[in-house]
Structures are given as C-alpha cells and as structure tokens.
Image (cartoon, grey):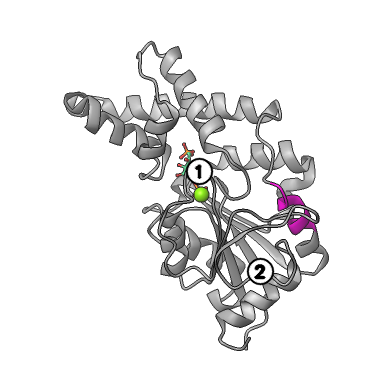
Amino acid sequence: MQPLAALVFDVDGTLADTERDGHRVAFNRAFDEAGLGWHWDVARYGRLLRVTGGKERIRQYLSEDWPDRLREPGIDERIRALHAAKTRHYVAMLETGAIPLRPGVRRLLEEARAGGLRLAIATTTTPENVTALLKATLGGDGIGWFEVIAAGDVVPAKKPAPDIFHRALQALDLPPAACLAFEDSDNGVRAARGAGLPVIVTTNEYTRDQDFTGALVVLDGFGEPGAPATVLAGAAPVSPYVDVPSLLHWHRMAQGSA
Ligand code: XBP
Ligand code: MG
C-alpha cells in the first residue's frame, strides 16, 4: 500500500470562495473600465462557470450574447487584454484581504505540514492570483508552504481535462495513489479522477448541486473544531471536521484497505 505523501489542492472554490465576490467582481470592474457595458450578475456568472478559465469564459459569454464579435479581427488579443485587466483588479482585491481562506483550510494546511505531508496546488486560475491569495491569507512565506504550484495556461487543456493534475504529480514525482486531491466542482473532480487521483470534495454555493460521481467523499466544507463539516456523500471523517487522521482514513479507503 502506498503511504499518503502529498495533498493536491484546487484553489477557486476550495482553498477560498473566490468566484462570486472575487473573480466575478473583478471581471465586472474590467468591463466597466473598458466601457463595454457588460455585467455578470451572480446567476449569470454561475452559468458561465461551466467553462473553466477566465479568457475562455469571456469567449463563452461573447458566443452567447455577441457572437459576431468573435469574428472581429484582433478579438483574441482584446480578450487577453481584458483578462489581464481583470487579473489586475482581482489581485488588488486580494491584497486588501477581501477574500479569506475557507474555514478549516489554514488549520488543515498547518496540520498536514506538521505531519510531514507535502502540499501542492493544481488550479485553472492565473499564477499571479494564486501567489496573491497565498500571500494575503498565509503571509509572505505562505507560497513556500506549497512545494508545487501548477496553475493557469501552463497546460494546453483546462479542467475537466486532467492535464494540470498530471503536471502537479510530475513535479511532485509521485504516483496518484500516494496523494489526495481536493476539489469543489464537477469539472475539478473529473480532472482529478482523470489523473487517477482520489478526490475529496468541499462544495460551495455555486457547486453544491453538481454531480460528484467518482469522489471519495463530498462535504460542505473542511469544518473546524466546534463547527463540524456536513458529509453530503461518502464516508464520514474520523473527526467532526477534516483533519489528518480523516485524510489517512479516506486514503486507506481509496486503496481498498480501510
Ligand atoms: C477556477 C477557474 C478559473 C477562475 C478564474 O479555477 O475556472 O478560471 O474562475 O481565474 P480552479 P482566471 O481550477 O482553481 O477551480 O480568470 O485566472 O482563469
Ligand atoms: Mg475550483
């Protein structure tokens, strides 16, 4: 049996609830700045989240509301520029401390590090967004907590393709059986499973009704002492919240030896 050696975390919706009050707001600020008159409300953004990747999401929106604009010369460059502006607004929001880590995340990361588990990130979002989030929430050395940060356009295909998880496993030089992945969305679960990773889901407002077939366990969050996590599917944690003993228990289950 492979011992558990590393934890591979998704970022958006998993480490922090970034979509509704972070990315969406930053997109709208970039649209305003560009004088486009576009606005993504909470519901519309929820539907657009079916497409992973910010540039891809702008393209999806155009295909739905302004299909002719997709044929305009230079549209790719304009999407890139608009997305770069969005990233600038998003990073500025993070630097104000506007987006905290989800309850239980910092505790679990600290417990995992104390327990000798290696930490990695596999995310669709732009690398600057990851470093800004980690710096703003964990402090200057927070980035160093993660041995591997695989993010954004470093891989050709985004989630639900498994590429970003393959990239993280390669960088860790570990087989999927020695790891556990953490995700919040069905696209993420399919990506992690596509890379052979056992995956633990923590849902959020945008993803709670999605299909998490293939996940080891589905919870409404990581939980904290005194604020237990609710199990929505799969085996309960060893403690009322997600901790290292629970991870070891789920990992054994994943290998059929619990
Ligand atoms: C979620 C995504 C990202 C973000 C926006 O990433 O799909 O595209 O919504 O970030 P994760 P960018 O894999 O962490 O859940 O605009 O930088 O793409
Ligand atoms: Mg996510």
Badge 2: how crowded within 10 Å, few (<14), some, or many (20+)? many
Which secondary structure, mark 2?
strand
Tell me the residue at 56%/31% (across/down): 22
Alpha carbons under labels 2 and 1: distance apart: 21 Å
The outermost residue toward the top is: 35
Which secondary structure, mark 1?
loop
Answer yes or no: is residue 208 visible.
yes
Q: Is residue 70 left or right of residue 47?
A: left
Labels 2 and 1: the sequence-earlier one: 2
- According to the image, label 2 marks what residue? 6
In magenta segment, residue 104: yes
Prevailing secondary structure class for the magenta stretch in the rendered image: helix
Provide residue 34's location: percent of width, then percent of height: 40, 14
Relative depth, front residue between 132 and 221:
221
In magenta segment, residue 188: no
Answer yes or no: is residue 5 visible.
no
Relative depth, front residue between 208 and 119:
208
Snapshot quadrant of residue 174: bottom right
Tell me the residue at 58%/38% (across/down): 129
Relative depth, front residue between 231 and 61:
231
Residue 35 against residue 55 in the figure, above or below: above
Residue 89 against residue 143 in the figure, above or below: above
As shown in the figure, which amino acid type bears the numbered disc 1? Thr
Split into 4 quadrants, where in the image is the C terminus? bottom right
Residue 13 against residue 36 in the figure, above or below: below
- According to the image, label 1 marks what residue? 125
Residue 111 against residue 67 in the figure, above or below: below
Q: Are marks 2 and 1 in contact (CB under 8 Å)?
A: no
Relative depth, front residue between 213 and 199:
213
Tell me the residue at 55%/24% (across/down): 89
For the magenta stretch, what is the residue range?
A: 103-110
In the drawing, what numbered circle is on residue 248?
none
